[in-house]
Amino acid sequence: MKKAIIGKKLGMTQIFDEKGNVIPVTVIEAGPCVVSQIKTNEKDGYEAVQLGFMDVAERKLSKAEAGHLKKAGVSMKKHLKEFRLDDISGYKLGDTVTADIFAAGEKVDITGITKGHGYTGAIKRWNQHTLMKTHGVGPIHRQSGSMGVIDPARIFKNKHMAGQYGSEQVTVLNLAVAKIDAEKNIIAVKGAIPGAKGGIVFIRNAVKA
């Protein structure tokens, strides 16, 4: 992984290629991000770059966060994320990272937090079948059937049942960058990405491209 950026999901739309084909894309406001910390092998045992995204008032940060950013000499940022890169020699403290580090046609991996659905049943959470809706079956149809068998007379661990659904970190691999608008800090990525509108996402080079 050689480059990365923090962005905000703006929503989905469609664009047309040179042949007139419709391409569904997700629009992301990517950056500008500021380099708020650089970690080295000598000091930290590994190499990484920490980026900050989205200006925020100092009163909305903790004392530790505000002190960390003041020490780096950068403006207050709401979101911080550390990226391990193959080569950090091109980054300096206080540098600005913008959307034009990527180019149209590149493959990227995007990480985000999926939409939260709260406490849901097994049918919505695990796509299980409903019970039969014929005469004599009911009155409840949207529930699981048998939980197990007589022997060993218990429910095995990891049985798909009702519970919290969504609000988990998901990474989508090998998405193609369809378009870049460097002036507006916009990256249009072909296809869908995790999360709701306004959600924070992390864009990196594809590791399996």
Image: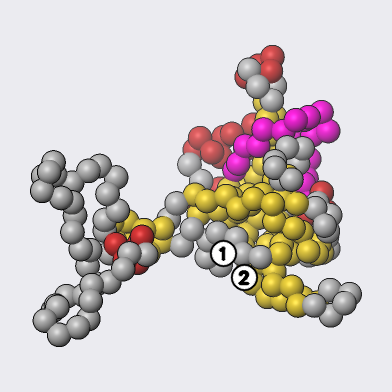
What residue is shown with label 1? Answer: 198
Any part of residue 57 in sight: no
The kind of residue tagged 1 is Gly
State the residue lying farthest toward the bottom: 135
| Mark 2 touches mark 1? (CB < 8 Å) | no
What residue is shown with label 2? Answer: 11
Quadrant of the frame with the C terminus: top right
State the residue lying farthest toward the right: 18
Choose top left, top right, bottom left or bottom right for residue 117.
bottom left
Who's the residue at 69% across and 52% down the image? Answer: 174
Who's the residue at 50% across and 54% down the image? Answer: 113
From the viewer's perspective, tell me whether residue 169 is left or right of residue 33.
Answer: left
Give the mark toward the camera: 2 or 1. 2
Q: Position of residue 144 (x, y in %)?
A: 22, 63
Who's the residue at 89% across and 75% down the image? Answer: 18
Q: Position of residue 10 (x, y in %)?
A: 63, 67
For numbered disc 1, what is the local secondary structure? Answer: loop
